[in-house]
Amino acid sequence: MKSQQAKLIVQELKKRKVKVTVLRENNDFIIAQKGGKHTFIKDTMTELCSTTTFTLANNMHAALVRLKKHGIPVCPYKKVVNIKQALPFLRKHGKIVAKAVRLLVKNDGVGVLSDLSTQKQLASAISLIRSFATNKRVPVFLQKQLSGDHCRVLVLDSKKIYVYSSNQKDLIVDKGVFIKAAKAFNLAIVEFECFVTKGSKSLITEVEVAPDLEKYGKENINVIKDFVNLIVNRLLK
């Protein structure tokens, strides 16, 4: 298996007397079996996530609409199809970022285009994102460019929370907000990208349903153990 994360997951499964079969080695696709039950795992995607939930959470616009309707603080956003629709949002927030709406582009390698503060910059960003899409009228997702500490918050089984800070700070987040956010999607494994602004308010910018657990540094092995315990207790009993 190629990834260290997959190797650690397999090790922890075997410690719990779970039989592991690698179905497609290059893609770290495994079958975990215990007793008469079995389940499929791909990276951190499990059968605890339905296709509907995956599609909803994996679409940035739909995911933030969902969170907002549940009273979860999110970064100001707008989905647009042309520069005319985008300009009022730019004028309101001064500096924004542009992203491709996931699932609608051939490749999300275009990433996030940030520091957009002029009409010319914004028009160029929209054109670049469109160049990755087969449908040239694919929507573009705009968000206010936030200041503060960037972090990711992993929630397992709506109980356990791990925080990764890109600048290595020990950030304090409102755990209740992220547990509520996880329950809004009914997801057993979910990660939220966010910024912690002044006053320690967390504003969610994206949702990830197949998070990379390796980024959690010294907590990595604990995250892996909790992930495997979730699989064993929810899917193999």
Image: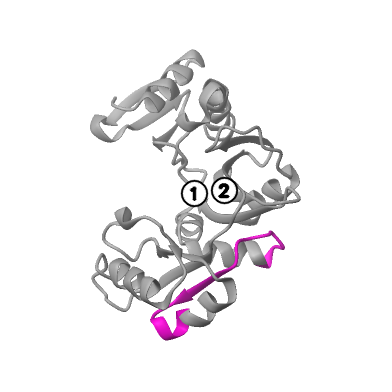
Q: Is residue 128 above or below residue 44?
A: below
- Find numbered disc 1 in the image and state the secondary structure of the residue it sits on: strand
Q: Is residue 32 above or below residue 200?
A: above
Residue type (three-letter) at the residue carrying disc 2: Phe
Which one is in front, 230 or 127? 127
Magenta stretch in the rendered image: 69-86
Q: Image quarter for residue 225?
A: top right
Which one is in front, 108 or 87? 87
Q: How many marks?
A: 2
The N terminus, quarter of image = top left
- Disc 1: which residue: 208
Q: Position of residue 161 (x, y in %)?
A: 65, 36
The C terminus, quarter of image = top right
Q: Tell me if mark 2 has few (under 14), some (14-19) or many (20+) residues whose alpha carbon lies within 10 angstroms of its own.
A: many
Q: Position of residue 43 (x, y in %)?
A: 39, 36
Which one is in front, 180 or 82? 82
Q: In the figure, is residue 5 to the left or right of 75?
A: left
Residue ID at (43%, 74%): 118
Q: Residue furthest bottom?
A: 84
Residue type (three-letter) at the residue carrying disc 1: Glu
Q: Tell me if mark 1 has few (under 14), some (14-19) or many (20+) residues whose alpha carbon lies within 10 angstroms of its own.
A: many
Q: Position of residue 135 (x, y in %)?
A: 27, 75
- On whether residue 98 falls in the magenta region, the answer is no
How does the figure colour the protein chain or chains? one colour
Residue ID at (45%, 55%): 51
**Do tag 2 and tag 1 residues touch (Cβ < 8 Å)?**
yes
Q: Is residue 190 above or below residue 122?
A: above
Q: In the figure, is residue 85 to the left or right of 218?
A: left
Residue ID at (29%, 67%): 128
Residue 131: assigned label:
none
- Disc 2: which residue: 192
